[in-house]
Image (cartoon, rainbow, N blue to C red):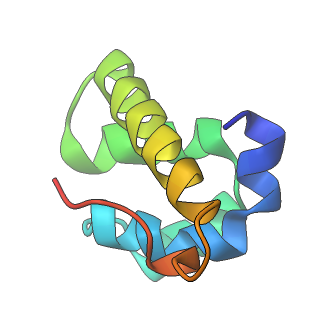
Amino acid sequence: MNADQFEGKWKQLKGAVKQRWGKLTDDDLTKLSGKKDELVGRIQERYGITREQAEKEADEWAAATASDLDKPGLGAHAGRRG
């Protein structure tokens, strides 16, 4: 999922982001407004990991979630915990 797709599907993704990264607050999610780069920075900050690790996690999650969003009936409940 590229950055434009990510931003375009943000309303669907917010719930899945919150499930995956529970340390992110509702305020964080509101401020992110679907910006993948900002999500990576916030994950890095909240979880105390490197930018590279945060990018890897976000990319893996986005790829899995994108395929889930394409399946009928899954929508915003897609995502995985980790």
Please say if 42 is above or below 78. above
How many numbered markers are drawn?
Answer: 0
Can you say which quadrant of the picture contains the N terminus?
A: top right
Please say if 6 is above or below 79. above
* Residue 58 coordinates in the image, percent (x, y): 43, 38
Task: Spot the residue most to the top.
Answer: 52
* Residue 32 coordinates in the image, percent (x, y): 64, 59
Q: Is residue 80 left or right of residue 67?
A: left
Q: Nearer the viewer, residue 53 or 42?
A: 53
Q: Nearer the viewer, residue 68 or 12?
A: 68
Residue found 69% across the figure and 65% down from its top? 10
Q: Is residue 56 left or right of residue 6?
A: left
Q: Is residue 21 left or right of residue 69?
A: left
**Displayed quadrant of residue 78:** bottom left
* Residue 51 coordinates in the image, percent (x, y): 38, 22
Residue found 50% across the figure and 67% down from its top? 28
Please say if 12 is above or below 9. below
* Residue 8 coordinates in the image, percent (x, y): 82, 58
